[in-house]
Image (spheres, grey):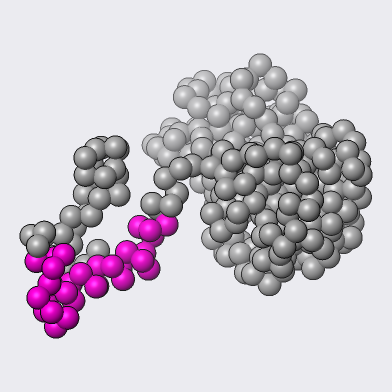
Amino acid sequence: MGDGVSVIVVPEASSRGGQNFIMVKEDHNSICKPRDKESANYLHLTKLINEISTSTVLKTVCKQRIPDDLQTLPQKFVKPSKCLEDIKEELKKHSCLALWGMGGIGKTTISKVFFNDLHYDFKFTLFTENVKLLQGEGRELERMLLADVHHNGRKPGGLALNDLKDEAILVVLDDVEKDCHTAFIYTLQQICSSKSRFILTARDKHILTQLHDVSIVAVEVLDSQNSEKLFQSYAFFDKVDMLQWQQEFQNEIVRGCKGLPLTLEVVGRYLKDCGSQEVWEQTCKQLMKIDSDSALIGQLRKYFFNYSVRIQSS
């Protein structure tokens, strides 16, 4: 953190104040009681305070208590940085961001990435995955969604719309497909602070056009390079010392997965530590049989039905 300053990690709850302990190479009195404002120790101390206040250290201290609603991300996540940067820019310009694309393309994962990243900037937060599964509309839907709103990372329960008046809230609704879902977002836009941000995912672009102040981002499939990288991260855990026949089948598998992250993950996990050339070949054949992208996830469920991995449609 600068000349004469080092950072050490000590056991949590130790007498030195936990994991965020900063040690300087000066004695206590000379640092805490400098002779005057021109002394080297005073300048050193003010520089240190400025570095802490403008660095991630202060933010890390505030994050020690992990919120209950932070989202779990896939073990491996591959998405071009430009794509994420573009989405971040859109969130700066619009209160509402809609991620649109086919199932398995990574919409839910991207929404989780941004929810976790922005979470600490908001007092109120709400993340609802597979909102289409909630039964009910209008007031009933509103009640169910409000019941899941978190305040400073904890669920208080019993919140009403009036409790959110002029408050800044971060909301993610995943897999939106009904008018009542967009109506709920519109209601929040009307009563909450203009600093609020709303992120939605959907397969139907038409439903998203009903939103106010929205930027609709089409989530693209992974290119061949990133598809190969993601597949290898699951099939080989980043160890690419594969056999020649595995390399040949890998090229076919990557093409068959059509750039869909979820498909690449499922197939990669299925083939992890598999040294059977016959299994790899059969997997290729099954993937090649699937003509439609939309049918891919359904076919994977059937073919890998006995594989214990939780498949999530995003």
Is the residue 64 above or below the residue 198 in the image? above
Which quadrant of the figure contains the N terminus?
bottom left
Is the residue 76 above or below the residue 25 in the image? above
Q: 311 or 65, which lies in front?
A: 65
Seen in the image, is 6 located left or right of residue 87? left
- Quarter of the image for residue 9 reads top left
- Quarter of the image for residue 300 reads top right
Residue under the point 61% across and 64% down: 88
Q: 309 or 62, which lies in front?
A: 62
Residue under the point 16% across and 74% down: 42
Which quadrant of the figure contains the C terminus?
top right
Q: 53 or 290, which lies in front?
A: 53
Region of the chain picked out in magenta, as a range? 30-59
Question: Magenta residues: mostly which secondary structure?
Answer: helix
Instruction: Confirm whether the magenta stretch covers residue 87.
Output: no
Seen in the image, is 232 located left or right of residue 284? left
Q: 257 or 162, which lies in front?
A: 162
Seen in the image, is 12 located left or right of residue 131? left
Give coordinates of residue 89: x percent, y percent.
62, 69
Camera sees residue 88: yes
Instruction: Confirm whether the magenta stretch covers residue 38.
Output: yes
Residue under the point 69% across and 59% down: 167
Give coordinates of residue 215: x percent, y percent.
76, 65
- Quarter of the image for residue 188 reads bottom right
Give coordinates of residue 122: x percent, y percent.
60, 56
Give coordinates of residue 207: x percent, y percent.
88, 54
Residue under the point 37% across and 68% down: 54
